[in-house]
Amino acid sequence: MILDALLPPVPLSSIPSIARAADKMGFDTLWSTETKHDPFLPGALIAEHTQCIRFGTAVAIAFARSPQTLAQKAWDLSEMSDGRFKLGLGTQVKAHIVRRFGMAWPESAVGKLREQIQAVRAFWHTWQSGDPLNFRGKYYKLTLMTPFFNPGPIDHPKIPIYIAGVNKGLARLAGELADGFLIHPLHSELYLKEALLPAIAQGAANSSRSLSDIDISATAFVVTSQEEEQFIRSQIAFYASTPSYLAVMSLHGWEDTANELSRLARRQRWGDMSGLIDDKMLATFAVVASVSKLPDAIINRYQGLADRITLYLPFIPGERDSYWRRIIQGIGEK
């Protein structure tokens, strides 16, 4: 099992030191998010200031961008890093696409993301091969690429594309045409076994592939202290209040709790929400263990279900370095 790291939401000036420390610590991949900052800009600094660590977006919001801008950023970062970049894409939910990004929500989120990925790869094929750009779909018609706008071939054109999701539709899409699937932190062992992995396998079979062809990356809630417990309860409550994630709660028979969380969220009663996450829910959605037993607990939960793990806790150099070394060593020895 492989351990990755999550980049904290910090200014670009802080990225080089974090990237060097993550590389030295021994993480495989350093993921940047699209929350308070752009997810692509850290990549250029990571590529410049490290030699080994891979890096990627987890995630960049696909529906806030055109296929050409996604393709171009990924192309440049792959070239700069000698192929260490991974393009991780997510759809976000309708409210954010419409009200935060000012973009239209598609008739089919799965259908549009499928076309975006195909279109991005069409740009890459044209730039690498010199063949004309000719992609025609429901959402995109892309037929113009002149030499002035063509960056030309690079040494590492096979850029991995990961997609993120919670529900079965995007999981099937990952199996169909992605290189990896980024599992949202609101998940359980049961949801992985009964919902997500079968859906990925079904999508893979539809494309004459197998589940083993898709890199399964899970972001995990972990609890090793009382302080972390309170924080993780609040995060579970926040995510579980989102109607798009109802399927996870429903599988465990917690629809009523999810609906109540949604009601509290609509009224902005954030402080009341975490109290609805009882100990059983906490243990279902989070790995609860002492620091010394955490590596074994992670392996016991995810062995056979995920290929790589990213803790929900961001990596900050100088904070809990011994904690990270213990986890990396413990997982690496298994």
Image (cartoon, helix red, strand yellow):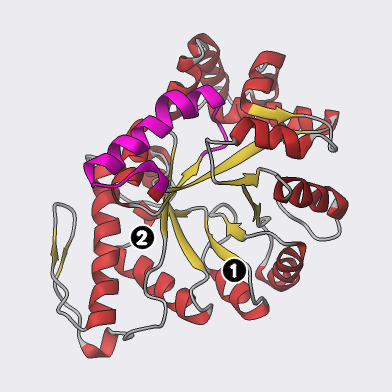
Residue 46 falls in image quadrant: bottom right
- Left or right: 222 as drawn, with respect to 184: right
Residue 187 falls in image quadrant: top right
- Left or right: 129 as drawn, with respect to 187: left
Amino acid beneath label 1 = Pro
Q: Which residue is mark 1?
A: 42
Assign the magenta stretch its main secondary structure.
helix
Q: Earlier in the sequence, mark 1 or mark 2?
A: 1
Q: Quadrant of the C terminus?
A: top right
Q: Horizontal and vertical percent for residue 227? A: 83, 32
In reply to whether residue 91 is colored magenta, the answer given is: no
Within-10-Å neighbours for mark 2: few <14, some 14–19, many 20+: few
Give the label, 1 or 2, closer to the camera: 1
Is residue 312 shown to the viewer in this render? yes
Q: Horizontal and vertical percent for residue 90? A: 42, 48
Nearest the viewer among 20 and 136 is 20
Amino acid beneath label 2 = Arg
Q: Horizontal and vertical percent for residue 170? A: 35, 40
Residue drawn 31% across the image and 63% down it = 66
Q: Which residue is mark 2?
A: 65
User: Residue farthest to the bottom?
Assistant: 148
Q: From which residue to which does the magenta span run?
A: 184-212
Within-10-Å neighbours for mark 1: few <14, some 14–19, many 20+: many
